[in-house]
Image: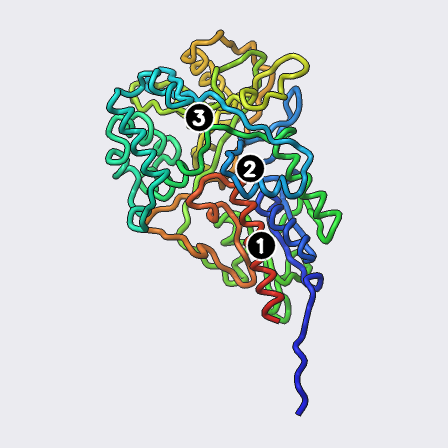
Amino acid sequence: MAVRQKMTKNTSDFNIAVIGAGASGLSIGYELQKLGFKVDIFEKSDNLGGLAGAVQLSKGRIDSFYHHLFKSDKFILDFIKKNKISSEIVFKRTITGHIWNNKYYDISSILSLKKSNLLSNFGFFRLLLGGAIIKYFPTTKELNNKLVYKIASNLFGKEASSKIWNPLLYFKFGKYAELMPYSWLRARIQDRTIELGYLSNGFESLYNHLADAINNSNGNVYTQTIIKKVEFSKDKKKLKINGKNYDRAVITTSPKINSKLLKDVHYSSRNLKYLGAICGIIEFNKRPIPSYWLGIADTNKRNKSAYKKFLAAISYAELDDEWNKSGKPTWPLYLASYCTKDQYKKYTKEEWKKIMIDASLELNKLSGIEKIEKKNIINFKLSFAEYAQPILSPGQNLFPNPETAKFCYFANMHNIFPNDRGQNRSFYLGEIISKKIHNDLIKKI
């Protein structure tokens, strides 16, 4: 009796499609081509990096949405070091400001927070105690699923909850603020480090490096390419995308897009909610605020200031020391918030510009540094991403596999939970998903 020979294949025998050339798509594509797979990455825009893409200002290009690294961002930092990317990461301490009740507070450090008098002595002690418990003590599944807004006062005390944590929830998540679980808060606190890092020449340089490596190896990165649908090949054993057959596909787009894109390949999804992100950059020729990060937590309903439409203001040059080392100094200021597409469409670009300028002038006045005026503005850029922040509640446990489709793997924003910082998680997904595809296609043969 003849013995059947076990069929063997190499990774180079398989074609993988990646839809979306953001951080996740490029990092996964990069890892796949290193394993020998043939990879095609499709991006509908002409920019790489997704939310980590860049825009042009007077002195160069900067991220269209603000980004920084923590020293705890293991996966992206390890990737940069391992691949000897020439751009240098610089870590430094920055000033953190806080707006409460129409007043500016410096909360950059424990000592600064104490001196600011934002909190009473007892409120200050309770805040530190709550932070220490979250950062250093183990948790349980039951606690992870509790709603943050219900337990914040027990963790941090009523004063810190009302002046810091509850406003953060409501400014960040809006109508979804009361759905957020403790697991999100815990990940947020445990991720943070005192020093922040920035990649010289911007994060765009990292994603250009990935695209070049892919294009020069086993893959292709196609920009300005729209994928209308993913369907089965004739024999139902592969996927067909833009007329070409692929053994597997990695999907990085939003559930709203996926429901149309993947409807022919048995797509299913839980009831996923998410917010978009609006981010304006106003480039000044004078320093607008004294802090890198200025969180906005003013819940006074009688205060009608324009700055209350935003979660934070971020002064780019306070982190990137290289920006003003040559030429005339300029000071790009981000005004950022999360919102739905309908909320974004409520105003025209010119109306958003006016709102953001008014907000920046108000925040400058509150911060107490040299006055800026409209005549100090030399550039304005506005960006909106419809899919930027997943909403996850204890009633919707999205792990594992919040979305499924035949022959597809998902690496979109819902796969970063409970973290809310996508770049580091994207490089983690690069390793995990590339290995999973390798195991599924090679080891089962």
Count residues near mark 3 (Cα–Cα under 10 Å), then give few for <14, some for 14-19, many for 20+: many
Q: Which residue is mark 2?
A: 51
Please tell me whether mark 1 sits on a helix, a strand or a loop: strand
As measured in the structure, the alpha-carbon distance from the residue carrying label 3 to the one carrying label 2 is 17 Å
Dot 3 amino acid type: Ala
Q: Which percent across, then down, holds residue 257? A: 52, 49
Q: Which percent across, then down, holds residue 90? A: 59, 28
Label ID, residue 131: none
Q: Nearer the viewer, residue 235 or 292?
A: 292
Q: Quadrant of residue 300?
A: top left
Q: Quadrant of residue 232?
A: bottom right
Please tell me whether mark 2 sits on a helix, a strand or a loop: helix
Would residue 277 be found to the left or right of residue 304 on screen? right
Q: From this view, report whether residue 400 is shown above or below residue 197.
A: below
Dot 1 amino acid type: Val
Q: From this view, report whether residue 275 is shown above or below residue 325.
A: below
Would residue 34 be found to the left or right of residue 131 on screen? right
Label ID, residue 250: 1
Please tell me whether mark 3 sits on a helix, a strand or a loop: strand
Q: Nearer the viewer, residue 29 or 264?
A: 29
